[in-house]
Amino acid sequence: MDIASNAAHPEAAPAITAPPVIHREDYRPPEWLVPQIALDFRLGIDATHVTAKLSVTRNPAGEGGSTLRLNGDQIAPLAVRVDGEAVNDWRLDGSDLLVALSGEAHEVEVETAMNPAGNSQLMGLYASNGMLCTQCEAEGFRRITFFPDRPDVLSTYSVRMAGDKAQFPILLSNGNCTATGENADGTHWAQWHDPWPKPSYLFALVAGDLVANHAQFITQSGRKVDLNIWVRAGDEQRTQHAMDSLIASMKWDEQAFGREYDLDLFNVVAVSDFNMGAMENKGLNVFNTRYVLAEPETATDADYDGIESVIGHEYFHNWSGNRVTCRDWFQLSLKEGFTVLRDQLFSADMGSEPVKRIEDVRTLRGGQFPEDSGPLAHPIRPDSYQEISNFYTATVYNKGAEVIRMMRTMAGTERFRQGTDLYFDRHDGEAATCEDFVKAIEQGTGLDLTQFRLWYSQAGTPQVSVSLTHEGDVATLTLAQTVPATPDQADKQPMPIPLRIALYDRDTGCHAGERLIVLDKAKESFAFGGFARLPVLSINRGFSAPVAIEFERDAEDLVFLAARDDDPFARYEAMQSLVVQHLVAAVGGGLADAERAAGRAAIGKAFAAIIADEALDDLMRGELMMLPTVAYLAEQVLVADPYAIHEEREALKHWLGGELASELTALHDRVSAVPYGRDAAARGARKAKAQALILIASGDAAEGAARAIAQYRAADNMTDRQSALTVLCNLEGPERDEALADFHQRYQGNALVIDKWFQLQASCFHPQVLNHVKALAGHPDFTLSNPNRVRALFMSLALNPKGFHDVSGEGYRLIGDLIRRLDPLNPQTTARFVPHLGRWRRIEPVRAAMMRAELEAIMAQGELSRDVREQVGKSLG
Ligand code: ARG
Ligand code: ZN
């Protein structure tokens, strides 16, 4: 040990060379375990002092080194003591602290200090709106104190914190509060103890001036749990939906998965500055305010749904994530994929199951399919990473959920439950792997998942090509699968693909029952007898597998299914396919006038049937009226001109709006008469209203403006107000200016609603959208330090086909500039913008060159974060 190195400078120099690559195969058990940790915080907004006392023991399963490695990040050891004595036997290796230890068990004490107000990365301990809070997943705890910051080191935490009583009246940490007290100098303190051993990423601390919405929940075994949702004074009347969702989640997890809560206290805190949605810290969930605060005047129906699902998601992590955690970060989908599936099933049970399924598939196709077909494609269990924050992806979360959902589909709900029961029983208190999960499901359900494990190791969306032939009275379905090559994975093996199918008799319009077939070879045929004519195939019903189906078929069959398929997802899918087939063919003048007219007529007929169908509820009607997004359409071709796709899609909307003008206005009138309510019928009315208004305005701008401004003025809820403003934003004229000015003025001071004001302007199709975005970036309400605000303006732009893909290249430059300016402040939020430029290989050459040049300009900027460097490097690679 080198004593002189004790003076080493705390701040690690930024990496000049490419950061090291971490490989899943290199996993080794920890050398040292930390069964207990005691943390002592002296809190201050710009200076917090931490003393950490770690009781460490040598891990019998480790390789037997005598050096204890404690990870650190931008902190310095102010003092190091071993067994109560100050020692010199330590040194820094990069930002890690290495302490030489002679025995089998020691007490290691380290003091550190940090400036929460200066922490713009929002990882570790930081200040937000005058309060202090933490975000430790994945590797933020090392920014608070030195620690083996890996999920397979589980410790029992005791926390003591002291701070100014006026500034921080509320002091919270994980577990239960065991003691509090006051000091003569105006400070007070609290002590917390969490009886459940946990990894460091689940640690949390909150200190601030907060008020709670309080309730109580009694678990199935009779445990009384105090529930608190903590917010800033004045926000408490906007917390009831979050509280109702929490109570519903707790009840649902007992019934659906047999999981009961395990502490006497459950705290949720809403924080305005947050990189992600929320965090499942044990007994102390920390949330982005946008997933807590809602009232009809300020939150849309979609906002309400988001709160229900994220509250559920974080609560469900208490078992899938906390009681059973991850061995290492490559196993992230073990907790995230499974927990997303759990929150999806929960939301489906709380509302409309078919509509929820459609929304989840739309999310997957909009966010995950593009990831799977681009330079950042990775399996749901990645093999390597440079920065783990970059792997909190739609693949790990949403495709991860689909993979587990397929096991459930193949096993059936009851047998699947036996599998999850076995998993929770067997691994409670452990840090597990995806392999552990699959084994438990295999044993609990009786399925053989040998080949199915490929879903964990192979990236890329499988393409299934379909043909259906007919001879005698036999229909033969031939399916062939290919899994496209992805970075580092050239050759793929066929995977088991469970497909729910039905064959409709053309004459009766009925089918003889749904079946589940599993395609597990490259190519396979399935024969079905008893058909006098070629039947109509309904396939991948309920989206039973996360694959792309390639099936060229007559518009007539799609119109047939869109009007009558008894699987609501398949019905939606038929509608989507009808539009996709038409638009993909039509882009760039690919259709003769007569073909275009025929294609539009088929779509118009299907739309008219949907508007007229009295058996449909309005929620589903609104869903069926949504056209596929430009991103999803662009996915259908190898090289896309997103702008041309956008124009063609708008042209179709214009035609539909004109063709169905009277049906649409009648629908808009009918649903406008439904009074506000949170019930399904009223929510459906608002959804259908929004879709009708969009098409009316596309068909006739003047009629659209008149209806939209009337809807805006009359609105008694945010859903209607926002859907009216969305339409007005696309139009030019005094109504637009009136509504935007009114909206800003009306909601001044309400950050979440001002976010909407930015978002609506940046996502609209106004001819001046890029100039608007530039002006908004200079608006006094804009700030780079709040991730919600940054996303409201710039993520909306990155997702806006018209603005982002403007042929001037200005959209790309605006995102490139943002990346360069934001990276030094907040790498994690910045890195999320890179994939949008990274799609250049799938974009037509003129735009592709500009996108690529933007990435190169970012790379040329010397000091990039590890987050951005990894994403840009892979996107150019
Ligand atoms: N575990 C959290 C969730 O899914 C996400 C936290 C991710 N945080 C991060 N900094 N990458 O609910
Ligand atoms: Zn999660």
Image (tube, rainbow, N blue to C red):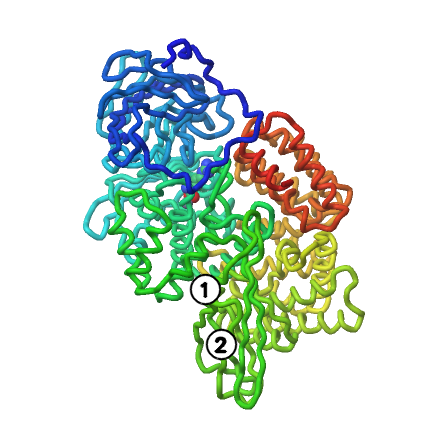
- The amino acid beneath tag 1 is Pro
Which residue position holds label 2? 502
Left or right, 749 with respect to 265, comes to right
- Depth order, front residue of 740/191: 191
Q: Quadrant of the C terminus?
A: top right
Q: For mark 1, what is the residue? A: 496
Q: Earlier in the sequence, mark 1 or mark 2?
A: 1
Name the residue rendered at 52%, 48% in the picture: 378
Crowding around mark 2 (Cα neighbors within 10 Å: few <14, some 14 to 19, many 20+) is many
Direction from residue 700 to residue 101 in the image, left or right: left
> Is 193 or 206 nearer to us in this picture?
193
Q: Is residue 237 above or below residue 673?
A: above
**Closest to the observer: 253 or 505?**
505
Q: Nearer the viewer, mark 1 or mark 2?
A: 1
The residue carrying pointer 1 sits among few (fewer than 14), some (14 to 19) or many (20 or more) residues within 10 Å by Cα, namely many
For badge 2, the amino acid type reads Ala
Percent coordinates x, y for residue 789 in the rendering: 57, 36
